[in-house]
Image: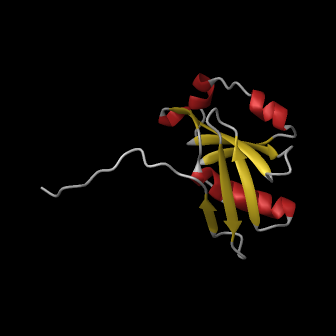
């Protein structure tokens, strides 16, 4: 998918992806928001696996990244020839992301489990 903010890296092996220990100081020097690393899944439960690193934003590794899957969805849809995909983001916390890619290959819907961690109200002064 189109993404002018992040660098996309595809690996051959899920084991390699899971074992990555990036040098976050070096990643901060890249002229990108973040680095998306992905590979085909070894599990029949998922189509692909990913990790997302954004130390330039103060997030060494994001546990579940919707914006990255808006890029990954069209990428894997084209490679796998399907428009409905199930992904696993292999952070320490881990997360399943369901991705649906529109017929034009540009519109992407994402879904999964979420937990409310904060509620608030904005008050106009």
Residue in the picture at 37% in, 46% down: 118
Q: How is the image coloured?
A: secondary structure
| Occupied quadrant, residue 9 | top right
In this rendering, position of residue 99 left or right of residue 122: right
In this rendering, position of residue 31 left or right of residue 85: left
Extreme-left residue of the structure = 125
Is residue 60 or residue 31 the one in the foreground?
A: 60
Residue 115 place in picture, x, y as percent: 49, 48
Residue 45 place in picture, x, y as percent: 81, 51
**Residue 41 to residue 61: above or below:** below
**Residue 68 to residue 99: above or below:** above
**Image quadrant for the N terminus?**
bottom right
Residue in the picture at 18% in, 56% down: 123
Residue 34 place in picture, x, y as percent: 59, 41
Q: Confirm whether residue 1 shows in the render.
A: no
Residue 85 place in picture, x, y as percent: 75, 60
Is residue 22 or residue 25 the one in the foreground?
A: 22
Q: Confirm whether residue 28 shows in the render.
A: yes
Count of numbered labels shown in the rendering: 0
Is residue 124 or residue 43 the one in the foreground?
A: 43
**Image quadrant for the C terminus?**
bottom left
**Residue 124 to residue 24: above or below:** below
**Residue 107 to residue 87: above or below:** below
Extreme-bottom residue of the structure = 103
Residue in the picture at 85% in, 61% down: 80
| Occupied quadrant, residue 61 | top right
| Occupied quadrant, residue 16 | top right
Residue in the picture at 81% in, 63% down: 78
């Amino acid at each position: 998918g189109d993404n002018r903010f992040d660098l996309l890296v595809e690996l051959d092996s899920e084991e390699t992806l899971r074992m990555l220990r990036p040098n976050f100081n070096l990643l901060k020097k890249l002229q990108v928001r973040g680095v998306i690393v992905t590979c085909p899944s070894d599990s029949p439960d998922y189509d692909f696996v990913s990790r997302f690193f954004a130390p330039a934003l103060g997030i060494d590794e994001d546990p579940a990244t919707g914006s990255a899957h808006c890029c990954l969805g069209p990428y894997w849809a084209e490679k796998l020839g399907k428009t409905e995909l199930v992904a696993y983001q292999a952070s320490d916390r881990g997360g399943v992301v369901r991705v649906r890619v529109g017929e034009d290959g540009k519109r992407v819907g994402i879904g999964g489990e979420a937990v409310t961690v904060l509620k608030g109200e904005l008050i106009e002064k």
